[in-house]
Image: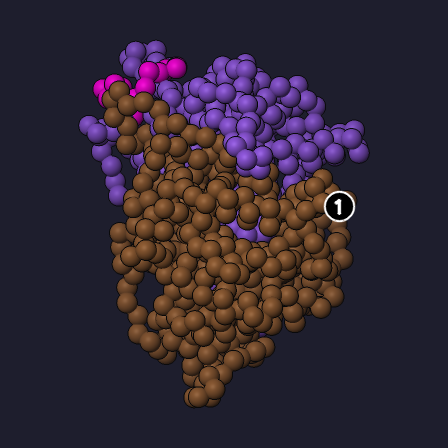
Chain colours: A brown, B purple
């Protein structure tokens, strides 16, 4: 996965420098470097290798039906009304990053280095009983069940005393950080507010103080007015490649309601959300040949879900290029593709 | 590259949860989740595959001697006194992320989305004329030349009007973001202060205001006093796996002087720095079988190099695991290895 800092490889004698521009993400005030003049065309990101095909059941997979004893006890499962078999299962990660034991007190041995127990929760949401299924190909009804499980676990955990933030996320494919083929999401509840959530929250609060309005609906409206980065708009949701996309094909799904956290998504929004998520993942799947991706559901910090200055949303990050030293070191991203171009590429697909 | 959020794969019926702790990085105040109880032993990070071997010259490589016309004109080259041939060459990246044209004025089309030209500089530092050489195997004298080139280009760029920050970095291997085998570093000069530099700077300034001391020498002293994470201490440098390492084998090289930027590293420190960098890279190379890595040289923002509250340092980040959705979304890292254990692993190597 070459990084854009290394494009000199493709140099030709006499070629001029690529023009770039810097765009500021309104939600974090971070600048992003974006290649202009179509430095890299959207079709160049199509994945060249197909994934190995899988059976619909694996005897060694802890997420397959019949192997439930290989996982910790389940917190939740949703059955199919007809067959009585589970369709979605949620349980603790056997090797959790955080677990609900210990103390949230910070302490230091030498007055300098601060440490606390890894208190929190880390859960796995198995999205389907089928070993070889994936979200992009699942039925609306099945995707809706997964989203409902997110909401139920969010609301179960938000009342736990030590929980300050809840991050719901998905790793699809090896370069997105998963080694498990069986389709699943995860949820981590943290005892501190993680850095990027704190930053987003602070920027939104500042915007509210200055304007009396919520930043996110304003952003959504400005994206809709510009239009060129929108890939889908429905009665309840807008899907777009944001103005200051950090990476090619970065995609945000934003509701038209005013819910600060995923815990308060109304019932009547779950099926429409399943619809836009399904379409968005299908387009990525078809357009880029099933790329690795992550998605993250952003909510306000726990206890601030009533705030009027945040809006939950879902970000999809296809993993099409490596993060290199400059980005690791500076936090300043280089995006080799214009979101206007990648959005057009997706719109062209969606019209076929 | 499995991510630690997915360790459930290795679950066994009846196994208990892995204990973790959270540690706070004193330089950013970010928390990191670190596996306790030796969840993953250092030797598990040894790379299983050898790299393909390369010739010492490639006719299509723009970095090889004889192919100089394939690159933009050079800013700098250092010759070997004996042969008169270049040993280090610096020139503009042919496809620069930023280039010294345009305006630093911010503007907005619609009063909401801010944009500016991609003004700055992006240079390539070719470290050796040999196509198949790498830093970890180079002579002290050759490494010192590379460091001298860093300093010379840093000082040339710091006087340019639009430059606010200078990041020197290296991408080694595909998962570190390079597609070019020929050993090289890069330098990017930015017209804004990138987020992570701004954060580091703010935390250091706050520490100075509170204590009257520079954070970094205090950190270095506390690391030396703890001792367990130190892998090398010389008269002029300390090398350690920091208390709140974000990733396995993350390694910091910190000087004992008080220079805020790489531009003011004194002559007499260059050869000793070459020595500790060589040793550190050799241990990683031998111990982990030539892993992909990035390194980044952190300096104070341009114009603040006289500050007494920052200290330049070099961070090496081996790329041993993928960054997954949780880390992308939250900025909260999960480190599957204790820095005390990885430092011990390196010390054991160094004593052989």
Subunit ID for the residue under disc 1 = A
Q: Which residues are magenta?
A: B63-77
Question: Which residue sits at x=71%, y=68%?
Answer: A160
- Residue where numbered disc 1 is placed: A110
* Quarter assignment of residue B218: top right
A249 w.r.t. A71: above or below: above
The quarter of the picture where the N terminus of chain A appears is top left
Observer-nearest of B34 and B341: B34
The quarter of the picture where the C terminus of chain A appears is bottom left
Observer-nearest of A205 and B195: A205
Question: Which residue sits at x=42%, y=30%?
Answer: A20
A305 w.r.t. B281: above or below: below
Q: Can you see residue B38?
A: no
Q: Is residue A47 magenta?
A: no
Observer-nearest of A337 and A97: A337
Residue A19 screen position, x and y as percent: 39, 27
Question: Which residue sits at x=65%, y=69%?
Answer: A155
């Amino acid at each position: 996965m070459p990084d854009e800092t290394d494009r000199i490889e493709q140099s030709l004698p006499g070629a001029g420098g690529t023009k770039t521009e810097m765009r500021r993400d309104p939600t974090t005030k971070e600048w992003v470097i974006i290649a202009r003049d179509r430095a890299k065309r959207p079709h160049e990101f199509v994945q060249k290798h197909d994934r190995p095909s899988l059976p619909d059941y694996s005897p060694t997979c802890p997420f397959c039906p019949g192997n439930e004893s290989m996982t910790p006890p389940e917190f939740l499962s949703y059955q199919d009304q007809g067959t009585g078999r589970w369709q979605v299962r949620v349980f603790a990660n056997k090797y959790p990053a955080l677990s609900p034991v210990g103390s949230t007190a910070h302490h230091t041995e030498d007055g300098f280095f601060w440490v606390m127990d890894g208190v929190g929760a880390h859960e796995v949401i198995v999205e389907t009983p089928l070993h070889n299924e994936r979200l992009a190909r699942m039925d609306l009804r099945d995707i809706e069940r997964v989203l409902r499980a997110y909401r139920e676990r969010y609301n179960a955990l938000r009342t736990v005393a030590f929980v300050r933030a809840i991050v719901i996320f998905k790793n699809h494919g090896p370069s997105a950080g998963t080694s498990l083929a069986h389709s699943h999401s995860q949820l981590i509840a943290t005892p501190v507010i993680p850095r990027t959530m704190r930053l987003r929250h602070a920027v939104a609060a500042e915007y509210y103080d200055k304007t009396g309005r919520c930043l996110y609906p304003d952003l959504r409206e400005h994206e809709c007015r510009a239009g060129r980065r929108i890939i889908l708009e429905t009665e309840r949701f807008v899907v777009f490649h944001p103005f200051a996309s950090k990476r090619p094909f970065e995609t945000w799904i934003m509701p038209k309601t005013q819910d600060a956290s995923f815990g308060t998504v109304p019932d009547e929004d779950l099926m429409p959300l399943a619809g836009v998520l399904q379409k968005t993942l299908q387009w990525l799947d078809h357009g880029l040949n099933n790329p690795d991706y992550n998605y993250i559901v952003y909510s306000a910090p726990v206890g601030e879900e009533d705030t009027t200055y945040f809006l939950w949303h879902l970000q999809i990050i296809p993993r099409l290029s490596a993060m290199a030293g400059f980005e690791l070191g500076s936090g300043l991203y280089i995006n080799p593709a214009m979101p206007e171009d990648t959005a057009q590429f997706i719109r062209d697909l969606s019209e076929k």
